[in-house]
Image (spheres, rainbow, N blue to C red):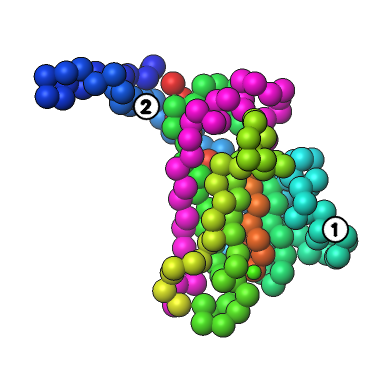
Amino acid sequence: MGRVCRIVAISGFLNAAAWCVCHGPDHIISAGIEDNFRGPPKPVTPSARLLATEEARIYFKLYGNSRFRRFDEDGGNRLFLTSLILPSRRICSALFETHLRRRFDGRFGMDYNDFLELGFAPFCCTGTHKSLFRAGIWQGDPFDLLVKTLRVPLPAVELNQFVFLTESPHYFDIMIHNDTTVDYVKLILRFE
Ligand SMILES: [Ca+2]
Ligand SMILES: [Ca+2]
């Protein structure tokens, strides 16, 4: 079913910035398994562009292949890189979800500077291969919060621009740095 746009009357005037409502079921694209971090580690599938980012090149240079994190893999100072493939359909709404566990107890440790980056590697500021989200993972949380499910709404217009202006396959790239264990990653999409 298509998208429905509603015209809103405010104070007797029609508001041109009408809001739109997505219909149809959720379409889920995921990687990893929702098993609450149960071992053994499961493989990641980073795109070539994600592997070519500056952060990945630094890890390769310093540690070879020994410091890349898989799903459900614990340990400090490991870079998590994986990618999901977007379908060639016009997206109406998008929500990213992941389940994370911090390595330390929050009072002392190196997870304070961990961050999540989402978008299209090499995560430029402009153009189609840009970053859509980058922020600290644990900043502002209570010390005793060690596990959480993180949900990030994403701009559908940016996802559609990438899907329709670049060649397939359309990789949605995910980076998590670098003392945080990852249970799974998921994109919840609805289409127009
Ligand atoms: Ca860290
Ligand atoms: Ca898992």
Q: Quadrant of ligand 1?
A: bottom right
User: Residue visible at 64% across and 21% down?
Assistant: 165
Q: Are marks 2 and 1 in contact (CB under 8 Å)?
A: no
User: Residue visible at 74% across and 44% down?
Assistant: 50
Q: Which residue is mark 1?
A: 60
User: Residue visible at 56% across and 82% down?
Assistant: 108
In the rendered structure, which segment of residues is drawn in magenta? 144-172
Q: Secondary structure at mark 2?
A: loop
Q: Which residue is mark 2?
A: 22
* Residue 36 painted magenta: no
Q: Please, what is the three-letter code of the amino acid marked with disc 1?
A: Phe
185 is higher (above) or lower (below) than 182: above
Q: Quadrant of the C terminus?
A: top left
Q: Is residue 7 visible?
A: yes
User: Residue visible at 57% across and 71% down?
Assistant: 112
Q: Secondary structure at mark 1?
A: helix
**Residue furthest toward the bottom?**
108
Q: Please, what is the three-letter code of the amino acid marked with disc 2?
A: Cys
